[in-house]
Image: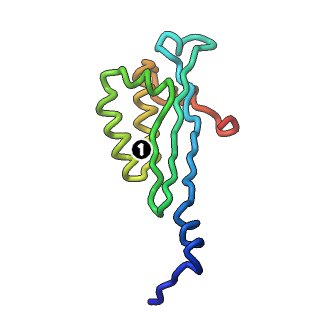
Amino acid sequence: METTYPASLKDYQEKQNIVPTTLSIPVLKMPISPEEARKESPKTAEIRMLVIGLNRPVTPMRSFVGEGVLILAQTPAWEKASQEIYEASVAGDKGRMLEVMLTLAAEYLELQKPSDIFDFAVPISEA
């Protein structure tokens, strides 16, 4: 196996100084309370998925941020849900992260069906 080296020290330093990309993707505009969820035009709090790229070949770090997360963090189910979200993030499982967050939001809003949470999802065209 052949070992390759950068052409110069400057090339090496440039490869080491890659700035990782950070994305903030809107996921949900969640009503701020179960009462608001029943209104025609509810007051909402946003939940965003923060994706932080790392400057090495590993899965990017992901977490949820926003006013909606702060509201959900006050619920009794938050500890368990946040642990599940963390474990899914470490495993690189975006689907599981979203499933846990959306389920928690649906429970908080006391929706009749958990799938009703998608009424508050941010369309891709707005993301």
Q: Residue at x 62, y 12 (%)?
A: 40
Left or right position of 68 against 100: right
Q: Callout 1: 10 Å neighbours few (<14), some, many (20+)? A: some
The vertical placement of 27 against 30, above or below, is: below
Quadrant the N terminus occupies:
bottom left
- Disc 1 is placed on an element classified as helix
Q: Residue at x 51, y 39 (%)?
A: 49
- Of residue 12 and residue 66, the one placed in the foreground of this image is 12
- Of residue 100 and residue 92, the one placed in the foreground of this image is 92
The vertical placement of 74 against 20, above or below, is: above
> As drawn, which residue projects farthest toward the front?
9
- Of residue 42 and residue 113, the one placed in the foreground of this image is 42
Q: Quadrant of residue 29?
A: top right
Q: Residue at x 55, y 78 (%)?
A: 6
Q: Quadrant of residue 124?
A: top right
Quadrant the C terminus occupies:
top right
Q: Which residue is mark 1?
A: 96
- Of residue 58 and residue 78, the one placed in the foreground of this image is 58
Q: Picture coordinates of residue 51 (x, y %)?
A: 51, 46
Q: Residue at x 42, y 52 (%)?
A: 92
Q: Picture coordinates of residue 82 (x, y %)?
A: 35, 35
